[in-house]
Amino acid sequence: MLGRIPILGVGPVVENGAWPAKGFHGEVVPFSATAFREGHDLIGVGLVLGAPDGTTVRRRMTMLTPGTDRWGTTALLDQPGTWRFHIEAWADDVATWWHAARIKVPAGIDAESMLAAGVRLLSRAAGVQPDASVGALLADAARRLGDTASPATDRLEVLGHSGLVERLTTGPLRGGVEPLRRLVTASRGFEVLVERERSGVGSWYEFFPRSVGAVRHDDGSWSSGTFRTAESRLPEIARMGFDVVYLPPIHPIGLAYRKGPDNALEAGPNDPGSPWAIGSPEGGHDAIHPDLGTEADFRHFLRSAEAEGLEVALDLALQASPDHPWVEEHPEWFTRLPDGSIAYAENPPKKYQDIYPVNFDDDPDGIRAEVLRIVRHWVAAGVRIFRVDNPHTKPADFWEWLIHTVNAEHPDVVFLAEAFTRPAVMQTLAKAGFQQSYSYFTWRNTKPELEDFLDSISHETDAFMRPNLFVNTPDILTTYLQFGGRPAFKIRAAIAATGAPLWGVYSGFELFESVARSGAEEYIENEKYEYRPRDFAAAEAAGDSLAPYLTMLNGVRRRHPALRQLRNLHVHASEDDAVLVFSKHLDAEFTGTGESDAVIVVANLDPHSVRETLVHLDLPAIGLPSGTQMEVTDAVSGQSWLWGAVNYVRLDAFHEPVHILSVKAV
């Protein structure tokens, strides 16, 4: 049912309130609604926002685009927990009168009648002020407006210069100068679930602990890296500015149908197998591979990571090798083929004979209880982030139940969905509770693709989905990276690190690893199936490492609060079909420094050329009035330039293909 003043299209709202919208601690969230009334009288619109601690925040909303009846404001959500909000609209008599008076009085149309109406409004406003001094100002303004000894136009002009009308029509909803409100109408209530900052902000680094410190012997056998040797990698990861270390599965690996190098059907005696083929007689999802160490060693690894300022994300892959204890203990958890064998995993044309998918249909309660037990086990060990493998191959209602159950006990636990699947499925998983999601970023490389992608993640799915822009994974080595050379690595890293507050790299990216299996977007000598020790220090000493560039990117993210927000991205124009331009801006009210923050990213997407073009900036989108000049300083090169709305750029892919520009008005 419509209220006296219709309020429609409230946001952020997910499926008409079926799930709460999402926010993270410290996120600046835009709120919006469509509101209007009949005729030409003006209205006021406001946000009423209830914090988890019971306090109420009220913010006046402004028209987003004239003539659209779309209103908006932003609010900093600075407490974790459930926030509740609704939108209010009311007849704004002062704004209506002021609009008419500025037209009629200078034209001599009913001038004294218009001013008399203004006297009544100001007198009413004076009578409702909690602050007596403000009431006195309004009463005096009413007296001056009604003084017929002065020309009508002069009285109106004096009132306009006083600023009182502006305070009445744009001031706060409560306190200070109170607007005169009639026909007050409220929307229904909605919720925003605000989770901890790491749920929405973080730089991820993925590596296989078995590869760090692995040694190959003369006879071809290997000594695996361990949690203790893997700790040696943590200081460098932290020095590059990463926040989260993600480990592929650390559990025992099955022997039956173990895969060899590059997914070969037969493994040799020295092949370690895929960590995703979980389970052996030594244990399943609650056990640790003996080659990596003990649970005490894992806890030591967690403490070492914490000492470096890193959180550890653990893989949660709900599947089993043929040797997993589940296969004998719970055969009903798997799909049987007509010949009695268990169906192995497939992602055509890929086949994973070493993995049995779990079937949730025959014993859903038993599976739920077991998975909850496993998650609780690792939470008790100190894990607070889980990267979930292929969640789209399990029932969505299972994930909704699991995440909500775990978060009810441990609100700080974060789940990342590795769901490279259809949009509807991926988005439903996010709505159901996943705090983070992989995205299609890896396959968005052209200017139109990236413009559409960046606009979509920041303005279309932002109420429920937090994309983590991984540039590569053990499974994904895109043709752009295969054939783009070193410039391609810089371009992709720069866009990922600045385009979203969540991004990640898989180990080896900083070494420009780009050789794929023939005809595939997958690494040759894939670390999923073999040890892959790397000499990062030697590469950096020789100048063959991207580590300094990654360090710079993460440093820029830390210095600029605008880059730690998702919903503030704005795409700008360039005259070259390979030059992408976008910005992020945060008002001074929300930065914590007292100054606004703006970053402009200009990227040459062609890793094989030099591009020269004109960039056209929407200055209000970066917090500057039209016509303003600004000083921009490039975080990559350190150079500064004086810019305006239209600017020449030259980006040499073989030198520096991306500008990351901080903005200072002059």
Image: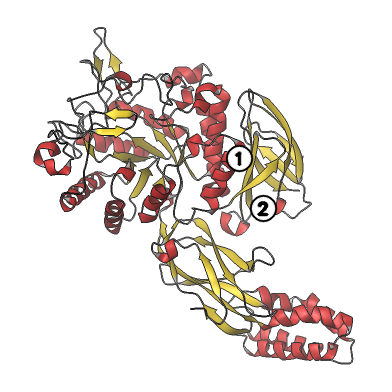
Question: On residue 79, which mark appears?
Answer: none
Q: Is residue 666 left or right of residue 568?
A: right
Q: Which SS class for mark 1?
A: helix
State yes or no: discs 2 and 1 in contact (Cβ < 8 Å): no
Q: Quadrant of residue 115?
A: bottom right
Residue 650 visible in the shown view: yes
**Residue at position x 60%, y 26% in the image:** 607
Vertically, is 432 above or below 335? below
Percent from the top left, x then y, of residue 349?
34, 29
**Figure quadrant of residue 147:** bottom right
How many residues crowd mark 1 within 10 Å: few (<14), some (14–19), many (20+)? few
* Residue 182 locus on image (x, y percent): 60, 85
Q: Residue furthest front?
A: 338
Give the number of the disc on residue 621. 2
**Circle 1: residue type:** Pro
Is tag 2's residue or tag 1's residue first in the polypeptide sequence? Answer: 1
- Of residue 290 and residue 580, the one placed in the foreground of this image is 580
* Residue type for callout 2: Ala
Residue 13 screen position, x and y as percent? 47, 63
Badge count: 2
Q: Which mark is residue 448?
A: 1
- Left or right relative to 622: residue 563: left
Q: Position of residue 261 (x, y in %)?
A: 30, 19
Outermost residue on the left side: it is 329
The answer to whether residue 435 is visible is no
